[in-house]
Image (cartoon, rainbow, N blue to C red):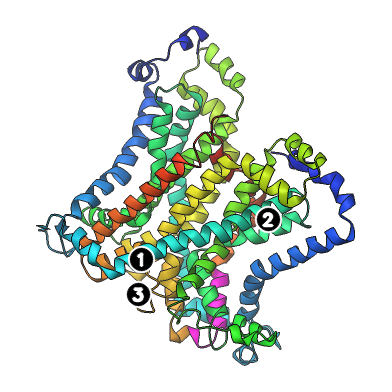
Amino acid sequence: MSDAALDFADSRRALLGFTGRLVGFTLLATLMFIWLGPVLLVVLTSVKSNNDFLAGPFALPTHLTFEPYLKVWFALGFGPLMANSFLYATAGSALAVILALVPAFTLSRLDVPGKKVIFGIILTGLMLPQQTVIIPLYDTLRSLNLLDTRLGLIVVHAAYGMPAQILILRGFMTTIPRDIEKAAYLEGASDLQVFWRVILPLSIPGILVGFTLNFIAIWKEFVFGLVLLNSEANFPVTVGMLKLNSDRYMSVFNLPAAGLVIAQIPIVILFILTYRRISEGNFAGATKG
Amino acid sequence: MSELLQTRQPSLFEFARAHVLATIFGVVMPLVVFAVFVGYPIVYTVVLSLYEWNGMTPTKTFVGLANYQYMLQDRYFYTALFNNLKWLAVTLVFPVCLGLVIAYGLRAKILPFPTLVRTVIFFPVTMSLISVGLMFLLILNPLFGAFDTLLQSIGLGGLVMEWFGDYRIALYTLTVVSGWAFTGMPMIFYFAGLGDVPKDTFDAARIEGAGHARMLIQVAVPQLRPVTAVVVMLTIFESLRAFDLIAVMTKGAPFGTTNVLGYLVYLESFWNSRFGYGAALSVAILAVSVGLATLVTRTLMKGAFDV
C-alpha cells in the first residue's frame, strides 16, 4: 500500500518540465475551484452581516460577525439536535462494532465451513436500499412501542452498521500474522482467549477506523431519522435542518450557511483526528477478497 | 489448530462442537441480525405489496397483484424509474470516471499537493446530503446565488437557467450535485487500487513510449477491474438509494419530474397512506437492484477476483 508502489512517474517528473507543471497546476486550480470553492463560499457567507450579504455572494464582509451562528443555533434548536445526533452516532456505532467483533474474528481467523456464503449473506445488508425495508421497520418498531424513540433508532443504526463493521474488521484482522495465535493455540488457549488476549488488542486501530466511519455514516443518515421519528425532540441534525429550506431562513443566506457549518463541525474535528487512517485504503479492504 | 485436521474440511456441526462460542456469537448472531433486519423486512415488504393498507387500521385487505397492475399504469412510477437510471448513468460518467482520473493524476504525480487534493475532494463524502443539498440551494439560488452571479460576471449570463424550476434540467442539477458529493468515494478506491498495481506493468508501458492517456486506459483500467467492479456496485446502490437530496432540494417538483423510486415509496406510504402500493414500489427497487447487481456480477466481476 505504500506510495512507492506506483512511483513510475518519479523519473518522468524531470521530463515534465514547464508544460507539465502548468497542466498540473491548472488541473489543481480547477479541482480546488469546484470542490473547495462552494465550501469556502458557505463559510464566508456565514460570517456576513445582512447588509454585507446584499452586496453580493463574492463580496468580502466589511466586518466579521458571528451573529448568524447564535441566531440559527437558537432558532433551529441546534443544542438538542446535536445532542441527539451525537447520541445516535456514538451509541449506534459502538453497538455496531461490538456486534461485529466476534463475527469478524470467526470469519477471518477460523475455518468455518461455508465461510464465504455466511459472509456474503451478512453483506447483503450493506447493499440494501433503505427504502425497501422502511415500511416493515416502521410497522415493527410501532408494534414494539419503539417508534419515535431514541432507543429504537439506535437499535436500527446498530443493526445496519454491523455488516460494514464486519467487513472492515475482518479485513483488518486478516492482516494480523497467523504465527502469533498459532503459538497461543499450541499452548492450549481457547478461541475466547485468543480473541480476547491476542486478536482484540491488535485490532484496536481497525476498531477506531470502523467506529469513525460508522459515526460519520450515522451523523449523515437521514431516511431512518425522518421516517422512524415524529417528535422534534428526538430529531437528529439532518432531519432538523430540513427546516432551513423555508422562506423564514432562505431570505438572507447567512443563517442557513451558519447552520451548515455548525452541522459539519463535529465531523471536521473527527476528520482531522483520523483522516490519515481512513483515507489510506481502509475503505478498499472491500476489494481484497 | 493441528495441521492434520486441515486435510479434511470439517462439517459445520463438527466446527460448532469445537468452537461453541465462536459459532454462537460469530455465525449465528450475525445471521439472526440479518434475518431480523434484512430477511424479515424483505419478506414483509413482498407480502404487504399484495395488500391494501392505510397504515393505521389493524386489518389489511388482500388485493393480489392489483398494486403491481396499478404500478405498470402509473406515470409517476415510470418517471421515477427512468430518473433512477439517469441518476446511475450520470454518476457512472461524472464522479466515477473523474474519481479514476484524479486518482491516476495523484499516483502519476501529475497533480501537485496530493494530500490537499485528496482531503478537499473527499471532504464532501463526510457531509450529509442534507447539508450538500442546502449548500447548493444557496449557491444555485436564482436571486442571490453565487453560480449565476459568476456566470454573468464572466459573460456567460446566457447560460443561466432555472436550475430547479425547469423540468428539463432539474433532475440533472440534482445528479450533478450528488456527483459532486460522491467523487471522493471512487477516487479513494481507485487511489488505493492503483497503489497495488505492480510497478513493472507501468514501467513496461512507459518503455514502449505510452503517454498518460494510454497508460490510464490500456494499463490502469484493466488492472483495476476488481476495484471497478466494487465501485460500480457501490454506484448502483447509491443511485437507487437517492432520496436525501430530493427531500431537501425539490421534493419531486416540478410536477414530479425529479421523483425517484425511493422518494415515491416515501410519498405513497407516509404521505398518501398507501402502504401496500409503497411496498410494491419497494419491491420494484429491490428487483432493479438485484437485476443490475446480477448484470455486474456476470460481466464486470466475472473472473475479476480470480487472482
Q: Are marks 3 and 2 in contact (CB under 8 Å)?
A: no
Quarter that holds the C terminus of chain B: top right
Residue A74 seen in render: yes
What number is the disc on residue B256? 3
Bounds of the magenta span?
A250-262
Q: Are marks 3 and 1 in contact (CB under 8 Å)?
A: no
Q: Is residue B30 left or right of residue A210?
A: left
Residue A287: x %, y % from top left? 55, 39
Q: Which residue is mark 2?
A: B102
Q: In the picture shown, does residue B175 fall above or below B140? A: above
Q: Secondary structure at mark 2?
A: helix
Residue B180: x %, y % from top left? 57, 65
Confirm whether the magenta stretch covers residue B28. Answer: no
Q: Which residue is mark 1?
A: B80
Residue A86 seen in render: no
What number is the disc on residue B21? none
Location of residue B146 (image quadrant)? bottom right
Residue under the point 47% across and 59% down: B88
